[in-house]
Image (spheres, rainbow, N blue to C red):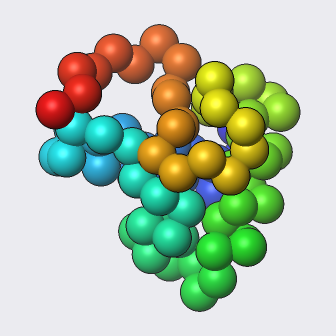
C-alpha cells in the first residue's frame, strides 16, 4: 500500500471513530493535506480498485466509504 493510501485509510478510520459515519471526499482532502478534492478523489478511486476501500453505492456518493475488515456502528 502506498503511503498516501495508508494515510487516507487511517484518516477515514479516525473520522469514523470520532463521528460514527464516513467522511466526505472534501473532508478526506482536508484531513490528508490535499488542496483539491480531485487529488483525494483520484486516490480514492485507485483504493477502490485495489480493494483497500469498498462501497455499495455508485462512485461519488457521499459518506458511502467502507474500510474492509473494520466494523463500526452508525450513530
Residue at image coords 31%, 40%: 21
Residue at image coords 40%, 19%: 70
Residue 19: x percent and y percent?
19, 46
> Is the C terminus in the top left, top right, bottom left or bottom right quadrant?
top left
Q: Is residue 61 left or right of residue 14?
A: right
Residue 12 visible in the picture: no
Residue at image coords 73%, 37%: 58
> Is the N terminus in the top left, top right, bottom left or bottom right quadrant?
top right
The number of callouts visible is 0
Q: Nearer the viewer, residue 9 or 21?
A: 21
Residue 30: x percent and y percent?
45, 75
Residue 69 visible in the picture: yes
Q: Is residue 61 left or right of residue 32?
A: right
The quadrant in which residue 35 appears is: bottom right
The quadrant in which residue 52 appears is: top right
> In this rendering, is residue 27 above or below 69?
below
> In this rendering, is residue 39 above or below 6?
below
Q: Is residue 44 left or right of residue 46?
A: left
> In this rendering, is residue 22 above or below 42?
above
Residue 51: x percent and y percent?
73, 24
Q: Nearer the viewer, residue 48 or 56?
A: 56
Residue 29: x percent and y percent?
53, 70
Judged from this view, the residue extending furthest toward the bottom is 35
Amino acid at each position: 500500500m502506498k503511503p498516501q493510501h495508508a494515510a487516507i485509510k487511517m484518516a477515514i478510520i479516525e473520522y469514523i471513530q470520532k463521528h460514527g459515519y464516513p467522511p466526505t471526499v472534501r473532508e478526506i482532502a482536508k484531513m490528508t493535506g490535499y488542496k483539491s478534492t480531485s487529488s483525494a478523489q483520484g486516490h480514492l478511486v485507485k483504493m477502490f480498485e485495489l480493494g483497500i476501500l469498498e462501497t455499495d453505492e455508485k462512485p461519488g456518493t457521499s459518506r458511502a466509504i467502507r474500510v474492509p475488515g473494520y466494523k463500526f456502528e452508525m450513530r
